[in-house]
Amino acid sequence: MGAVTTAPGTREITGSGKPSRRTGSPGWRTFRYAVLLASLLLVLIPVYVLFVTSFKGIGDASPSRTWFFPQAWTVENWAEAWEALSPALIRSFAMVIPAAVLSSLLGSMNGFVLSRWRFPHANLVFTLILFGMFIPYQAVMIPLVQLMIDINVPNGIPSLILLHVVYGIPICTLIFRNYYETVPMELIESARVDGAGMLRTYFSVVLPISIPSFVVVLLWQFTSAWNDFLFAVFFSTANNGPVTMALNNLANGAMLSNYGVSMAGALIASLPTLLVYVLLGRYFVGGLMAGSVKG
Amino acid sequence: MTRVRSWIPGLLLISPSLLLLGVFVYGFIGLSFRESLTDKHTAAQATGRDEVGFVGLSNYTELLASPAFQHSLRNLVIFTVVFLLGTLIIGFCWAWVLERPIKGEGIFRSVYLFPMAVSFVASGVVWKWLLNSNVGEQASGLNRLFQMTGLGFLQNEWWTNPRYGILAIALPAIWQLSGYVMALFLAGFRGIPDELREAARVDGASELQLYRHVVFPQLSPVALSALIIIGHMSLKSFDLIMSIANQSAYSTKVPAIDMYNFATIYDYANSAAVGVILLVLVALAVVPYLWYDARARKRG
């Protein structure tokens, strides 16, 4: 079976393991817990550092104190980071929401046609669309830079919305197509027999059962556009770009960087995607499983 | 009224997407390639004030012959190999120990996977601190942690090492993506029918034989997906390097950084050439994969 198109859905991994399976000997169980806990600690090291450092004041600047709790907890770093990042946070939302909505609508229509309202060579067209998901955007960047100047799309959020919509189409199409493949053809046929045209079938039969896929796709697009840095660095500045640009400027900009402020900033900038992950992790995993990641 | 061929409306519905992707993916790849065949190396040429000439493939031959670009390619190879091995091994092990029911499974899984939700720019902030190259009295980050835990001999200069600095960047990359590979493998494990294992056990297969003849073959499509996904991400690596080192650090330079640096000095020809080289590298891995996938789909 195809690897991209038949990537497993969310249920298989989010449901707990099958109870019928043997859980193994006590020794094996201890070993498993040892591995799991050690890994847990290692994975959480950066989180500990972020959290602790973000609450440290000047008094904790000595390298010998780096791994300890602050001597005096302070929220100054958070206040400073918030001031530096909040305009960019708003811009990020203004970029990500329209980008996610538009690309998922397009992806839904594409997915429907490519699986349930096929035309000749639909499979070839689908493969050509999928290729767009893997290309390094470096390979289209120079013409893009020139295009944005030529067609006068203002630098900053408007350019970025356009880019995230267009380059989001392949992954959105893939996720919806995989989902619609599971919709029984009889459902489509019966709508057709009832005289419904393509649009009627799409809007009254397919779209209403697409909500779970929309959640997956919207979250996926939200996260990848929110976390994007490559397009941001080419098409915006710290003053008109998304929060990744502002954070990079805060942490690596001309000013002498203060780790406490940068770390508070990193936490603030990650909060929306982390919240999404915590609250809707199941769907988030669904996006991951669809077989793609954008770097 | 004659009946319109029923598939035409479908094609119409998706034509806006096809048009956009045709231009923004295939059209622009073509334009990049054309750009890379010119001598557009200055701002005056980029803005049309000076003339641009056609130079054939000479940008490619010069890039590939230059020690600086060879260094980038070498870094890219080292990074990709380590990133792939790291995420595949760790991801597989996590999936392997989580595969059968265990208390707290949900927590472990969520924690391993969460770094994936964070941007490379944000994780770069903390990893820059962890990978601080100071040693001895001034050490902080991981070097300080090594001192405190009696592992002082492990202290090193991390990403500032001129030969192997790129390995230090692989560390956060592995941290961020191992959970994803785990999720893929876990789905693969759970997709193996119980009956298959039971049948093998009934036939007297040992645990080892069970893995060799039943589990691994069933997991190979998942492993291939992981390989392609992590591999193509690795070739495009940019954000992490920008936020931990920066674009001017020679030790951690990769082609994506070169591409950006050429663009900032308006050397569009070389910038486009590096982009095309990256595309070729990605295509070498992805095109056979998509082809295989398309054939599998045809067979159903």
Image (cartoon, rainbow, N blue to C red):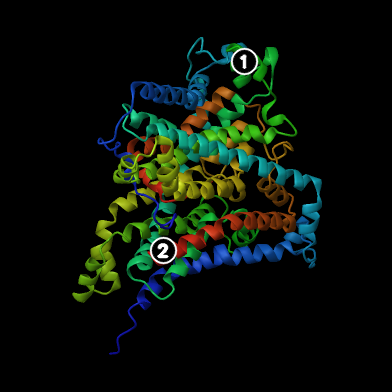
Q: Which quadrant, please, contains the N terminus of chain A?
A: bottom left
Residue type marked 2: Arg
Residue bearing the label numbered 2? B297
Q: Is residue A257 left or right of residue A291?
A: right
In front of the other: B76 or B136: B76
- Within-10-Å neighbours for mark 1: few <14, some 14–19, many 20+: few
Residue located 53% across and 47% down the image = B227
Query: Which quadrant of the structure image shows residue B76?
Result: top right
Above or below: residue B231 compared with residue A23: below
Residue B83, image x, y percentages? 58, 39
Q: Is residue A134 left or right of residue A90?
A: right
Q: Is residue B15 visible?
A: yes
Query: Which quadrant of the structure image shows residue B26?
Result: bottom right
Asked which secondary structure carries label 2, the reply is helix
Q: Is residue B119 visible?
A: no
Above or below: residue A20 compared with residue B295: above
Residue located 55% across and 63% down the image = B24
- Within-10-Å neighbours for mark 2: few <14, some 14–19, many 20+: some
Mark 1 or mark 2: name the one nearer the start of the chain.
1
Residue bearing the label numbered 1? B151
Of all chains, the one bearing label 1 is B
Residue located 77% across and 53% down the image = B64
Residue type marked 1: Leu
Q: Residue furthest top?
A: A71
